[in-house]
Every structure is written in C-alpha cells, then in structure tokens.
Image: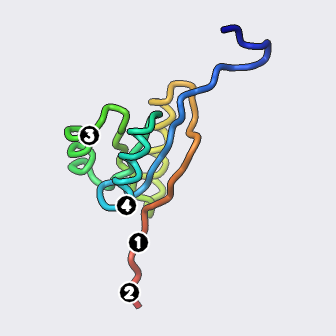
Amino acid sequence: MSIPSGSQPALEPATLVTGASGGIGLAIALRLAKQGGRVFAGVRSADAARALRDTYDAKLHPVILDVTDPTSCHAALVEIVDRLDGGHLTTLVNNAGIAVQG
C-alpha cells in the first residue's frame, strides 16, 4: 500500500484511563485493551501498577498517576510520551475522582 505524499500511516489508538486500578476504570481499560490499541491505566500506587502488569493483557500499560498531584501528572505524561515513541494519545477517559465530604 502506498501512502500519499504528506500523509502518515494511521497510528495505533492509544488511550489513557485514569482511576483504572479497579471498578469502572479497570473495566473500561480492559475493554479498550481487548478491542485493540494501547491502553495506559492510571493507578495511584506501585502496588496497583504491579498487580495490573502481572495480571492483565500486554496492551494494558499501568502508569502511576494521582490526578490530584501536579508532579504525578507531569511524571505520568513524560512516561506515556516516552512509551508512545513518536505516537500520541487519541483518547482520554477521565474516570478518576475524589470524594469530598461536607
């Protein structure tokens, strides 16, 4: 297949799902990984990242990400950009949340 001049081949879809250590976030991440593409699963701890890495599909990439911490967000972004090796995120599922009692 030839690619027209000035065009680039389609990149594999890449999604970041925040709050993916369990519940709805994990279910979304697993479904997207099963459908194809790379899925970055945002989790808050190294233990959660290790559990995902040891248990699930190779297309599911755990990334330590605490959405309430700017330093953690920046570190996660740097890691994702590095892993995509010239690609880019195509989708963000912002599932992480915090509980505020009042």
Q: Residue furthest right?
A: 5
Q: Amino acid at mark 2?
A: Gln
Query: x%, y% of residue 17?
Result: 44, 51
Contact flag, marks 1 and 2 (Cβ < 8 Å): no
Earlier sequence position, callout 4 versus callout 3: 4
Rendered view: 8 above or below 22: above
Q: Amino acid at mark 1?
A: Ile
Contact flag, marks 4 and 1 (Cβ < 8 Å): no
The residue beneath circle 3 is 56
* Disc number lying in front (4 or 1): 4
Earlier sequence position, callout 3 versus callout 1: 3
The residue beneath circle 4 is 24
Earlier sequence position, callout 3 versus callout 2: 3
* Drawn side of residue 86 relative to residue 22, left or right: right
For the residues labelled 2 and 4, the Cα–Cα distance comes to 21 Å
For image coordinates 54% across by 50% down, the residue present is 92
Residue closest to the eye, 11 or 67: 11
The residue beneath circle 2 is 101
Give residue 5's mark: none
